Amino acid sequence: YRQTLFPIVQGSVYKDLRKESAEFIANQQQQGNAIGGLSVGEPHELMYEMTDLVCGILPHDKPRYLMGVGTPENILECIALGVDMFDCVMPTRNARNGMLFTTQGIINIRNEKWKEDLSPIDAELGGYASTFYTKAYLRHLVINKEILGAQIASIHNLAFYLWLVKQARERIIEGTFTEWKNKMVKIVSQRL
């Protein structure tokens, strides 16, 4: 295997520092570029503003990797700004705490309303973990602190994130991304 390093654009939420860092990095010879320091508590609007600024400077023919971001909404908004790659602990960390991301919205599986719900976690998503296990069964596992509950929820959330970016890619290719993104941001942000 041949490894590569992505230089990281920094500068917090200061436009002048971000611009200087992005311009310097854009002139280097590298395989791709990373954008760092925007997932450590900044308001989302500032994160989007800085990401937009940086993506306007970095080369369009090399991958742009936004470090540590984020929610499904963040990912969709940042794809729209020109980001290609992400990493984040959110799908598994939130799963371990009973939060599921679904094609219909966010589920806190600990809530009483799921206690007798025999529907699959997310029938639309597909995949074994999302369609085989019921919400009631997963809730039982999570409430009783069974490790299997965290595992199923983690597998489901990772499958959801993979589905989300695959859908985004398909919509980009079709030329319908913006309309789809605007609809999906509302759906994936709502709590069920």
Image: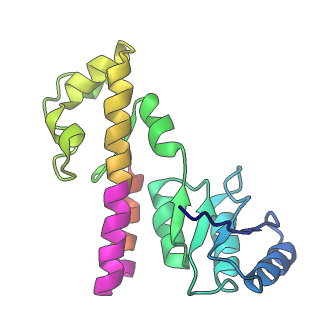
Q: Is residue 79 magenta?
A: no
> Total of numbered circles in the picture?
0
Task: Identify the residue at horizontal 22%, vertical 41% (top origin).
Answer: 130
Q: Position of residue 119 (x, y in %)?
A: 14, 35
Task: Identify the residue at horizontal 39%, vertical 15% (top origin).
Answer: 145
Q: Which residue is farthest front?
A: 1
Left or right of residue 95: residue 136: left
Rendered position, 46 above or below 157: below
The magenta segment: 162-179
Left or right of residue 111: residue 22: right
Q: Out of 152 and 27, give the one closest to the viewer.
A: 27
Left or right of residue 91: residue 102: left
Q: Identify the image quadrant of the C terminus.
A: top left
Q: Out of 65 and 191, give the one closest to the viewer.
A: 65
Task: Identify the residue at horizontal 21%, vertical 25% (top origin).
Answer: 136
Left or right of residue 41: residue 102: left
